Image: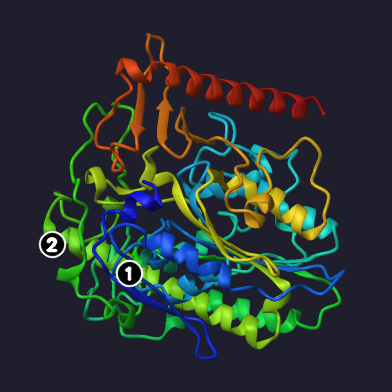
Amino acid sequence: MTIKGAVSKLDAAPFTIKMGAGFRIHIPLCRKGGLAAFAAALPAIQAPCQEPGQRPNVLLIIADDMRPEMGCYGVEGVKTPNLDRLASESTLFGSAYCNSPVSGASRASMLTGVYPRHPSRFTTYDAWARYDAPWAEPLQSCLGRGGYHTISNGKVFHNISDCDSSWSEYPWRVHPDGYGKDWAQYNKWEIWMNSTSGNTINPGTMRGPFCESADTLDEAYLDGKVAKKTIEDLCRMKDSSKPFFIACGFWKPHLPFNAPKRYWDLYKRDSIPLAGNNFLPKGLPKEVHAPSEIRSYALVPDDLGEEEFQRMAKHGYWACVSYVDAQVGKILHALDSLDLGKKTIVIFLGDHGWQLGEHSFWGKHTLMERSTRVPLIVKVPGQKPSVSYSPVELVDIYPTLCELCGVSAPEGQLDGMSLLPIIRDPETKTKERVFIDWQGGTATVDGRFNFAVWPAKGSPPPMMLYDHRSDPEENVNVSGKRRYQKRIRRFREFLSGTAEREYQKEKAAERR
């Protein structure tokens, strides 16, 4: 669903973004033109220019399972003041997509700038860049080669030791052994001995409840610790002779929906809107499976359609979004307090989307729009804020930073395109469509259509096509309608051509 489509469903709900020094922007989020008003207000805010010859620092912030569920994306009710402020100073990308709707594959693809390719490259939740694409130079290595000091905090690559030697410092996580040990806190017990959730676990997985609202400090959970470490590194790098690249990976709003009680208290559960299409799309291919990850946690009912569960789950997701927003705010405040804001590129993104009851799905792991569309906010010193609807994808981050940082990209490796032309002029279009790969299916989104096809011996193969102009919520698969066949042929040519190019790239790399 596009931002314009989302905003068209909102009731009038003005809000104000605080900009510091007593300056505020009042944004009327009305049925038509809410984000248009937001975009219209932006050019009046000019980011300070960078000093001539100075190389920018880079702060890359990644949130896990974060769809564009933020005020700046036209979502009414969710509390994200810090991300909204960042968006008001940045280029907000309204049509940004991951290249795989699962964490490990998405991150490995983004940080190498290389598309996934079923079944050999970036296909699973725990994908390794080191093993799937050993020939690819990761982003941190490229920037390090260009003179940057590179730091990884929290969940950046899925696996802590993936390409670990290519960072200037060994990647940091709360537990020094990384995911396998963090898992004990992340998926099992964090504060789960408190009275609000009880000592309840899923006996099949030994995971605790799917949500929790402990009355505790931000630093009691992993993301508060990640923010604290990142701020300490900003302080340490302030006077460094080298520019820095700090990647900060937050765990939330990934399951379990655990956040300090103060973030749950921001919301009245009965007022949180639920998905209006809690049913399977008409004509959905059998290849599209309902995500099952949430069932690995305790206190999840057999019927995910129960209203009480839906309200609690979305309440938990929103609480975690606000918790992440608060951590981002702390980091951005530190950046400005250290006088680093004027010389630091800031990128915020989600590694993929997440379905909050749409089509009765709770999770990612599909080629539906809610699984693949992500928030992407890019702040470049000296560039005017804007909103762009050009189709972009996460593999575009790598070439963008190469261009902005004056570092040569690895020859023949990158599949993405620099976002800088769009940042300079939001009406610019660098590509017609994006590429997404998941479990053998491939998809493309072009701003109006979401098309996916799966390999099959029969003819025609399983396909789905959603026309967002008439069906923004993707409730009816129109791939069988005659009037779309010419367009479908073009989509299939793009997908098969991309898959073949990736195959040839892989074979060439093997020969080297």
Q: What crowding class fits label 1: few (fewer than 14 Cα within 10 Å), some (14-19), or many (20 or more)?
A: some
Count of marks placed on residues: 2
Rendered residue at 34%/33% (across/down): 467
Quarter of the view holding residue 360: top left
Nearest to the observer: residue 92 or residue 197: 92
Relative placement, left or right, of 174 versus 475 is right
Rendered residue at 49%/77% (across/down): 327
Residue 299 pos. (x, y %) = 20, 61
Nearest to the observer: residue 26 or residue 272: 26
Residue 40 pos. (x, y %) = 49, 64
| Residue 308 tag number | 2
Helix, strand or loop at mark 1: loop
Relative placement, left or right, of 409 versus 469 is right
Q: CA distance from mark 1 to mark 2?
A: 19 Å
| Camera-side mark, 1 or 2 | 1
Q: Is residue 108 visible?
A: no
The quadrant of the picture occupied by the C terminus is top right
Residue 256 pos. (x, y %) = 34, 63
Residue at mark 1 = 78
Q: What crowding class fits label 2: few (fewer than 14 Cα within 10 Å), some (14-19), or many (20 or more)?
A: few
Relative placement, left or right, of 87 versus 380 is left
Residue 470 pos. (x, y %) = 29, 36
Q: Eyeballing the image, is 289 above or below 299?
A: above
Q: Eyeballing the image, is 255 above or below 118?
A: below
Residue type at mark 1: give it: Val
